[in-house]
Amino acid sequence: MNFNSEQLDILNAKERIVVVSACPGSGKTSVFVEKLRRLQNQWNQPRRGIAALSFTNAASSEIGERLGLLNAPHFLGTLDSFMLRFVVQPFSHLVGVLNSGPRLVPAPLDERLEFPKLKYGSANGDLISIYKVNIVGGSMSSPICSFKHPQRGESIRLSSELSNKALTIKRQCWQRNGYITHGDSNFIAAQILTDSKIGTICSRLIGERFPIILVDEFQDTMHFLSKALFALLENSVVSAMLVGDPDQAIYEFGGASPHLFSDALNLEGSQLYSITKSQRFGKAIAVITSALSESAKEIVGNERATDGFTRILIHQLEDNQLDSSLARQLLSRLPQQDSSVILARNSRIVRLLSPASNKSAFQGRSKAGRTIDSAVSNLRSGDMTGAMNIVSQLLWMFITDKPALPTDSELEEIQVSRAEWRIYVFTILIEASKFVESEVWNDWLKRVMREFEKAIISMQQPFNAGRNFQSDKTDGTQPRVQNVITKSLIQENSKVITVHQAKGTEYDHIVYFLNKAHATHSPCISQEWWKTIPSEERRIGFVAISRPRKSLTLCLHKNSYGQILKVGKGFVDNFSEVADL
């Protein structure tokens, strides 16, 4: 590969800590791999190695594919796996973890451990497994913890008092059985390396083993991982290259800090290098990404690329009007021979715009029949959680007449554990998903009803299915159609993804769809993109608009467009075209 002057400056840099701020499409991974290759080729220390680290396993795999084998004494992997292997496992007994060593509970198995629980609210059912609580910020003595609400799916941040209580319970588990999650491991690594008594010694030992540390996607480093990393880099014998883009730091909700780059530049012997030339897109898209850059980067487009086409499409749709026909309409405006994708801010909008793969094919009057068939469709499209929740809610309704998911306290009242409940739900779901040749809908319904009835009798509860499971002498006699998710449907679904899913990818054409703003769950970009303080929403927007190679379409509600004209008219003026959808 021919490297430009900015890239060569980085490859030839001599500073102890090289901090690289690279714009989208700058070829930063190529620079990272080339730096690693050069170091590996001249390496002559068999007992010491290079640590090449990234944010995800996928990113580490890409580096490995480009580089080839990176054998011992070197290490290629994620930053959290490095900390687990070389910090937590050998030294955690010094900070109160079980002497026989920690036992990592990998995701998603950590969500299956039910006890011990933390009470986070006043209601009887406000209980959450301690293994579902994440330590996302704060300090060693005063952490900030959060968890994902099991029913609503939103992130809940705990109070200072509850966060400290969660840490106390976690420490008891670490001492008793050694079970830790990935988040726990990161916290323990930071505790070890920043400890006033053992931190310097442990950092020195690891520095002797890995005198060079390279980190890709540096902006995504979580709170306690960054504390552990900076503790290692304070050792003057360790040199490093930290590569990323502060404008693409979109995991602040999980503990990543937008101030990582400025913190890194406070390390002794650090120097900032920038790559401002994008190889992905031309001038038109470069101008818009520069305008949204929170770090005020002036991004230079690829001189060999066409300028590209940019436009704003204005819609007037409410959320209940969003469906897959809108997605098809948006995609039909783009060249069919090229790669195109619609980006949405969250998974809820993705589901609304995606083809109705979970639509029930059930023929008959039974509401429960349609509901269960929708769960089967969810299962076949890969949404196990959604499928389980549908069946769980229906099973609970048959027992209590309450159309809701049961809480842990409600299950305790009928003397059923959460683990037992999940087994009942899973068994029903698997039975419902079985396809029997020549079976009509009524026979399928009776078969599934027997499975519900068996589960409820096993729990020693009354079966209140009533008319919900009635057979139908008309449509219900139609042969049951196996609701298979076809290849074309999978391909069509993959045309609508979240911005977080698109991170690290690029397409010929991007449509960034923004639904109508709501005060509680969809803030208006006019309020977020032009804040005077760091805004994660602005950085999410930056990631979205920097994915395309050829064309960018920003599709937003008319209300948002009107507000943008008041605060960011210059941004709007950068687009080639503004039109109504």
Image (tube, helix red, strand yellow):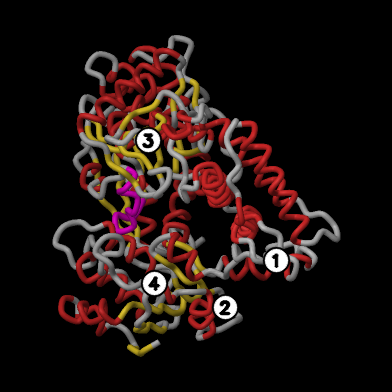
Helix, strand or loop under label 4 = helix
Residue 438, compared with residue 182, is above or below; it is: below
Q: Earlier in the sequence, mark 4 or mark 2?
A: 4
Going by the numbered disc 2, the residue's amino acid type is: Asp
Residue 43 in view (yes/no): yes
Q: Mark 1 = which residue? A: 486
Q: Which mark is residue 338?
A: 2
Q: Residue at x 37, y 79 (%)?
A: 317
Where disc 2 sits, the SS reads loop
Contact, mark 4 vs mark 2 (Cβ under 8 Å): no
Secondary structure under the numbered disc 3 in the rendered image: loop
Real-space Cα distance between discs 2 and 1? 22 Å
* Label 4 sits on residue: 319
Q: Find residue 401 and report its horizontal and vertical position in percent.
A: 49, 47
CB-based contact (under 8 Å), mark 1 and mark 4: no
Foreground label between 3 and 4: 3
Which one is nearer the viewer's eye here, 117 or 4? Answer: 117
Q: Marks 2 and 1: which is nearer the front?
A: 1
Q: Position of residue 448 (x, y in %)?
A: 70, 49
Q: Is residue 79 above or below residue 142?
A: below
Q: Are marks 1 and 3 in contact (CB under 8 Å)?
A: no
Cβ–Cβ below 8 Å for labels 3 and 2?
Answer: no
Badge 1: how crowded within 10 Å, few (<14), some, or many (20+)? few
Amino acid at dot 3: Gly
* Mark 1 or mark 3: whose residue is earlier in sequence: 3
Q: Earlier in the sequence, mark 3 or mark 2?
A: 3
- What amino acid does circle 1 point to? Thr
| Observer-nearest of 169 and 16 | 169
Alpha carbon separation for disc pair 3 and 2: 51 Å
The magenta stretch is 244-254
Q: Secondary structure at mark 1?
A: loop
Instruction: Please name the residue that numbered disc 3 is placed on.
Output: 125
